[in-house]
Amino acid sequence: MDTSIRNHKSYSNFQETDLEMLETLQSQTFEYFLNYWNPKNGLIADKSKPDSHSSIAVVGLGISSYVVGLERNLLPRKEAIIKILTVLNFFHDGEQGPQKDAMGYKGFYYHFLDMKTGKRAWESELSTIDTAIFIAGVLTAAYYFRGDNKEEKEIRKLAESLYRRIDWQWALNGGPVICHGWKPESAFLNNYWDLGYSEAIILYVLALGSPTFPIDPVGYRNWTSTFEWGNIDGIEYVHAGPLFIHQMSHLWLDFQGIQDDLNKKFKIDYFENSCRATHIQQQYAIKNPMNFKHYSINNWGFTASDGPGPAIIKMEGVERTFYDYIARGVPFGPDDGTISPWAVVASLPFAPDIVLNTIRHAIKRLKERNSADNGFDASFNPVYQVAGNKGNGWVSSWKFGLNEGPMVIMIENFRTQLIWDISKKCPYIINGLRQAGFTGGWLNQIK
């Protein structure tokens, strides 16, 4: 039996059933990437809602999840290769140009694509961060499939081409930091990755490590200099409210023991920072400043996810504002009583003691509702009562690829460090980390 879960340095409360619990949850979650994809082009739906468009970030998460699924015998090797080759060929051959209905431009891709045609959907932006998440998945496949057969060579060839043609320098729009995106109707957006801690470390690492269009490290240093060092309930950390910010780049990058200039200043690494952020989330639920009755030591998880709103409802003399899909965060909100269990699972490597206890609690709740076989809901809110729902409150109707992928990947990183170890074999990621100023730990051991 794989006992790596027992040996995790910060985990002290292992139960024999935990391994089986994680395997079951990972398998149930992985099914999203088998059920909501188009076999003709490999695109993966943003969410399980019928007629949903594809999200390019979800495609990247899906590619990395296929690798996990192969390792866990949830997907035959031949099928995994077919899925990955299908989507890589589709993106490689997709129309690149300034046209309003193209698939992408300058090597980047539109945030949402039509599931059937691959053309731009919802007049979405050419997204730098979502392209980076897609490419992180692409490089995962390239440095996992290292065989000499035709198919695996083709995966590496396509991945190399997709990465090399991204013009990161163009995305600077003449400045030092990367723009959020671009639209053919109005050119570059007004927002840049220049202020406050966010999920964009993976974006900067890929842009810095590019062999064709690398950006100057000054932009990364300018950005990290704006990070806020805070103290929440006696815990000091680089602050960001939503939990996903403390997780997204970590899906591929193992920050344990490596530090950039900001880390050295505060004597912390981003892995430890995410550990602290996870504990802060649980402590917020225990303190429960807005008096939501369902918050507790084992009922927490505040992040970007679905919600019951928009609505403003007066409840027990208190006017409550409810949101739909929004980035909820702690301790400064927004907070409308909505909890996202998937976000807790994606913090498994950071705080296994409190996360596993919370997973057990969540599964018990699902069993009471006879829905434990479907994996975790995207989010739920018992306070928001829906007519005819017998007092159970609101539960998201859909599953989201942006939720499912992190669960699959982080369960695996906790157990075997699979995706982290693959990334450590990628010279572009290694170079990008070094250009960003990271040193120490495993990075110093690689030539």
Image: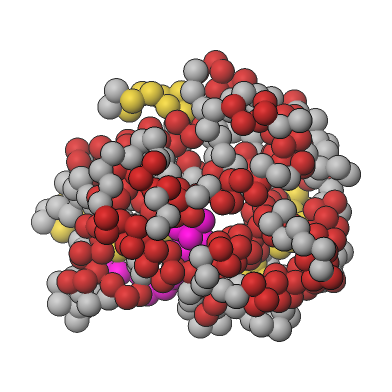
**Residue 196 in sight:** yes
Task: Please check the rendered image and state whether residue 91 is part of the magenta-colored stretch, yes or no.
Answer: no
Question: Outermost residue, front direction?
Answer: 1
- Where in the figure is residue 226, as x and y percent of width and height? 57, 26
At which x and y percent is residue 39?
Answer: 66, 82
Can you say whether 101 is above or below 298 in the image? below
User: Is residue 401 highlighted in magenta?
Assistant: yes
* Residue at 52% in and 80% down: 35
Q: Residue at x 86, y 42 (%)?
A: 211
Res. 134 visible in picture: no
Name above or below for residue 271 compared with residue 425. Answer: above
Position of 184 compared to 234: left or right?
right
Q: How many marks?
A: 0
Please tell me which residue is depicted at 49% across the width and 23% down the height of the picture: 268
Identify the image's colour scheme: rainbow, by chain, secondary structure or one colour: secondary structure
Query: Does 143 sit left or right of 2 as displayed?
Result: right
**Residue 359 rendering spot, x and y as whole percentages:** 29, 56
Which segment did they paint magenta?
Answer: 393-410
Identify which residue, 369 or 245, lies in the foreground: 369
Quarter placement of the N terminus: bottom left
- Using the image as rendered, state which of residue 66 and residue 133 is in the foreground: 66
Quarter of the image where one finds residue 34? bottom right
To which quarter of the image does residue 51 belong? bottom right
Q: Residue 219 or 236: which is nearer the viewer?
A: 236
Residue 129: x percent and y percent? 65, 50
